Image (cartoon, grey):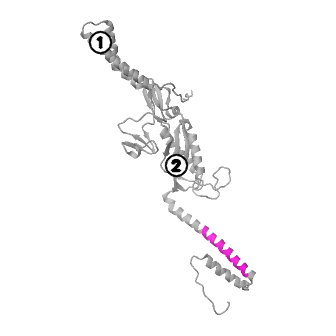
Amino acid sequence: MEDKILEEKLLQGKKNGLLMLLITLLLYILAITGLVIGIVYLDSKTTTPLTVALFVICLVFICLGWILFCGLKVLKPQEALVLTLFGKYVGTLKGDGFYYVNPFCSAVNPASHTKLSQSGDVKGLGGANGALVIGDASVNTNQEMPTKKLSLKIMTLNNSRQKINDCLGNPVEIGIAVTWRIVDTAKAVFNIDNYKEFLSLQCDSALRNIVRIYPYDVAPNVDTTGDGIADEGSLRGSSEIVAGKIRDEIQKRVEEAGIEIIEARITYLAYAPEIAAVMLQRQQASAIIDARKMIVDGAVGMVEMALERLNENHTVELDEERKAAMVSNLLVVLCGNHDAQPVVNSGSLY
C-alpha cells in the first residue's frame, strides 16, 4: 500500500485572535466575579443549587480556562505554522496576523533545532551559544526553546568547501552558495525527516556529480556536454554553466521536500593544496610558451617586413648568405631576453 502524499492545506478565516483574546479575558473576569459571588453566598448560608453550580463552573473555568490561550498564534511576514491535531495534519497558517486555532493543535518543525551555515541560522552557528556542531549542521543545546515556525524567506546556504576530483582526476576544492526557500510546508515537514540536513546533503551530492564532469581548466579531448564532441568547458572558464547545472541537479533532488532552489553560485574554486604548486608551475610554463610564441610570430613578421623594404628601396644589395646572417641577427635581437650588445664594424661594408 502506497503512502498518501500530503499536500499543503491553507487554513482560512483564522485571523480572529484579537477577538478570542478579548472574549477569553472577559470570561475570566466574569468567572472571577461569579466565584466571589459564590463565596459570599456560601458564607451567608443562603446557598441554592444554582449558586453551587455557578461556583463550581467559575472555579473550573479559572483552573482550566488558560487552555484557550494556547490557541492564540502570532505570525510575522514570511512565516508559517504547520499544525497537527493528535498526530493528524490539519493545515498551515501563512501570512502575518493574529490567529486563533484549536488550542489542542500543535505546531511541527523537525528542523527547528538544526543550525546550518546559512542566513537565518546565526545563533548557535559554529558551536557558539551552546550549539553542538556535527559536520555542516549543528544541534542547539540552549535552554531556550527554538521556534516551531517555518521561515518562508529566501535563504542562502553556504556549504563547507568540498575536495572533489575533476574529470582528469585532479583534486580541486570547491564551495557553493545555494539560494533557496520553502514553497510547500507540508512536504518540507512530513516528507523529509529534517529538511535542512536533507538540503545540505543533497547540495554536496549534486556538487560532486557535476564537478566530476568538468576539468578545472580547458583540456583537450574532453566532452563536458555529453554530445560526444570535445569542447572547451571547464570549471574555471564555464562557471555560469556549471552553476546552472548544479542548481538543476539540486532542484531535482529536493523537489519532494517542497523546496525551491532559486540560484546556485560557485564561491570558491582552487586546486587542492597537494597539487597546487605543481599546477601553478604548469600554468606558468604554459603562459611562457604562449608569450614566446607571440614574440616569435612578431619577430618573423618584422624580419619579413625589413627584407621587403630593403628590396623595394634597393638600399643595400644582399646575397642569400648575407640575408641569412641578417635574419639570424634580427631574430636574436627581437627574441632575446636581454638587450643586444652590437659590434660596430667601421672599416668596410661587411
Q: Is residue 33 magenta?
A: no
Residue type highlighted by circle 2: Ile
Q: Is residue 183 above or below residue 135?
A: above
In this view, the residue in front, 165 or 71, is 71
Q: Is residue 59 visible?
A: no
Magenta span of residues: 290-310
Q: Is residue 291 magenta?
A: yes
Quadrant position of the C terminus in the picture: bottom right
Q: Is residue 326 visible?
A: yes
Q: The residue tagged with tag 1: helix, strand or loop? A: helix
Q: Are marks 2 and 1 in contact (CB under 8 Å)?
A: no
Q: Is residue 22 left or right of residue 349?
A: left
Which residue is labeled 2 in the image? 176
Q: Quadrant of residue 330?
A: bottom right
Q: Quadrant of residue 249?
A: top right
Nearest to viewer (mark 2 / mark 1): 1
Q: Tell me residue 147's x, y (percent).
A: 42, 35
Q: The residue tagged with tag 2: helix, strand or loop? A: strand
